[in-house]
Image: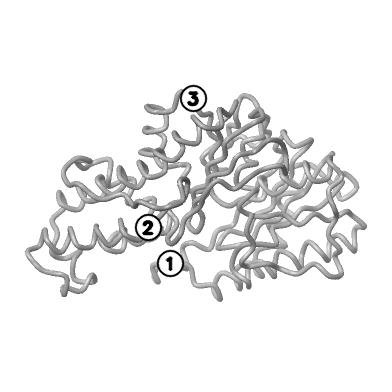
Amino acid sequence: MIILGIESSCDETSVGIVRDGKELLANVVASSMDLHAQYGGVIPEIAARSHIEVIIPVLKQALAEAACTWDDIDAIAVTYGPGQSGGLLIGVLMACTLAILKNKPLYAVNHVEAHLYANFLTESKVEAIVPRSEQPTFPMLGIIVSGLHTQLVFFRDHFDYIMLGQTQDDAIGEAYDKVARLLGLPYPGGYHVTRLAAEGNAKAYKLPKARLEGKYDFSFSGLKTAVLRLCQKLVGQDYTLPSIEIPHLLDDEQKADVAACFARTACETIVDKVLIAYEEYQPKSVIIGGGVAADRELRRQLAEKLPQSIEYPSLKLCGDNGAMVATLGYYKASRSASQADPYSLHIAPSLSM
């Protein structure tokens, strides 16, 4: 069974083609990141225009790279939420139109859930992508860490899961981006914080971790504020100093140390909860998905503290991509999940798992 997946929830327009939920045939991604860099973050209207411009070329390229015609495609999967309304609309309209014109089954996919399904790819015809050596086994503990989502999920089987906890404010990726702006780093912030953190002393300063009633819930807004107060103190000012002035007052060593201490504390916040969940639920596999899954400090801490090793998806599959959507679509199709009606499928920007 060959599934074509469409992803357009943020600033990446992507089409992935996957065979039998494990073999990657194509994964084409067109990012509008360069257009957003001057604004320090994604501008939804600009992203939506970019999706309109590139989605057809991306689709054609994916089919060509997979050496597939529409006769080979068994079903279409598309992200219908969560995400930015403009981007979701473009992807869903394209998927619905193709499902009608090509007479293909259509499956609506949750973007957050799809991030974890990149872990089920174990074969790849795409040279730049090295997949995992084997698929995870159930029961499994899923860690979702991205720009807008931080969640801990326990899976008994496909589509049989319980949400253990999630962020109550900022997601970890969002916190990375805000700290990046505080330090005067360019967009995308998380990438540059991670690089700078590698040069700093992760024990130079002590930063707080949130204490919440929910055993598996997360919070990063307090940590972000603590970094702001630390930076104001380092430059000899109080809380009245505007954050926009801080990058010009910190020296390079201070910036690197702040980045390292922030990254260590943010990742510890995740790992602490993962260890508690691991002890309670005793999963056979632990998987991770989302852009922050590529973070070196998070990987280091998990390798150091978790009793079992984690096999990560390819770095190119940590961010938003069509391959993860197609993979989840395969498991929906193979397990006879409900099909979406291409004449009535609506986007769900605030969709949750």
**Is label 2 or label 1 in front?**
2
Q: Which mark is residue 175?
A: 2
Q: Position of residue 295 (x, y in %)?
A: 41, 42
Amino acid type shown at disc 3 = Ser
Residue bearing the label numbered 1: 41
Name the residue rendered at 75%, 37% in the picture.
Answer: 21
Compared to 135, does 33 lie above or below? below
Assess whether mark 1 and mark 2 are in contact (beta carbons under 8 angstroms): no
Q: Quadrant of residue 238?
A: bottom left
Quarter of image, res 102: bottom right
Residue 13 horizontal/vertical position (percent): 62, 59
Q: Amino acid at mark 1?
A: Gly
Of pointers 2 and 1, the one earlier in the residue sequence: 1
Q: Residue at x 14, y 59 (%)?
A: 250
For mark 3, what is the residue? Answer: 309
Distance Cα–Cα, label 1 vs label 3: 34 Å
Picture quarter with the N terminus = top right
Residue 59 % position (x, y) = 73, 56
Decide which of 45, 254 is in the foreground and name it: 254
How far apart in space, not on screen, are marks 2 and 3 (Cα)?
Answer: 26 Å
Single out the residue that lies furthest toward the front.
213
Give the structural element (helix, strand or loop) at label 3.
Answer: loop
| Image position of 323 (left or right of 165) | right
Alpha carbons under labels 2 and 1: distance apart: 13 Å
